[in-house]
Image (cartoon, rainbow, N blue to C red):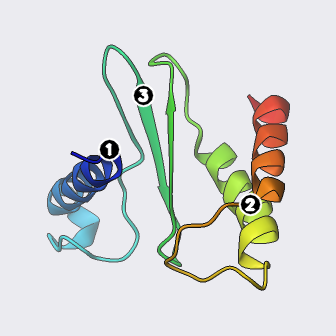
Amino acid sequence: MDDRKMMFGLLFSLKAFVNKLDPTSGGSEMSGQCSFQSFRTNKYKLHYLENPSGISLVLMTDPLTGDLREFLRHVYSTCFTECVVKNPFYQPGQPFTSDQFASALNKAVRTHL
């Protein structure tokens, strides 16, 4: 099975589960902003950030890594917004490749992590 589809299914299920248990969501599975932020296994930690625009950022790290929400917000606001969203050839909802985005992301990782 395609890894992207498996990851989507995992994240979709986790978000729905978390929202069902979250008292602020009123039990609704899709009630706006998701309170799911990360989960950890003995092999990795998955960090998750969903923006109001619906863009999701996922980062897998060492299981002992701390909270990376601020880093993911930085990646969205600087790397993604500046290099992808402002690109006139970007089509929302479509896969993209961007050397500028890759370079900005690598710089952010070296600087912040």
Q: Residues within 10 Å of mark 2 (few under 14, many from 20)?
A: few
Badges 1 and 2: C-beta atoms under 8 Å apart?
no
Q: Give the foreground label among 2 and 3.
A: 2
Q: Quadrant of the N terminus?
A: top left
Where does residue 50 sit, x and y in percent of width and height? 47, 62
Q: Which amino acid does the dot numbered 3 rest on? A: Lys
Residue sitting nearer the eye, 9 or 45: 9
Number of numbered discs on residues: 3
Q: CA distance from mark 2 to mark 3?
A: 26 Å
Q: Is residue 85 above or below residue 57?
A: below
Residue of label 3: 45
Q: CA distance from mark 1 to mark 3?
A: 17 Å
Where does residue 54 sit, x and y in percent of width and height? 47, 74
Tag 1 secondary structure: helix
Q: Quadrant of the C terminus?
A: top right
Residue of label 2: 98
**Residue 67 located left or right of residue 2:** right
User: Which disc, if any, is residue 3?
Assistant: 1
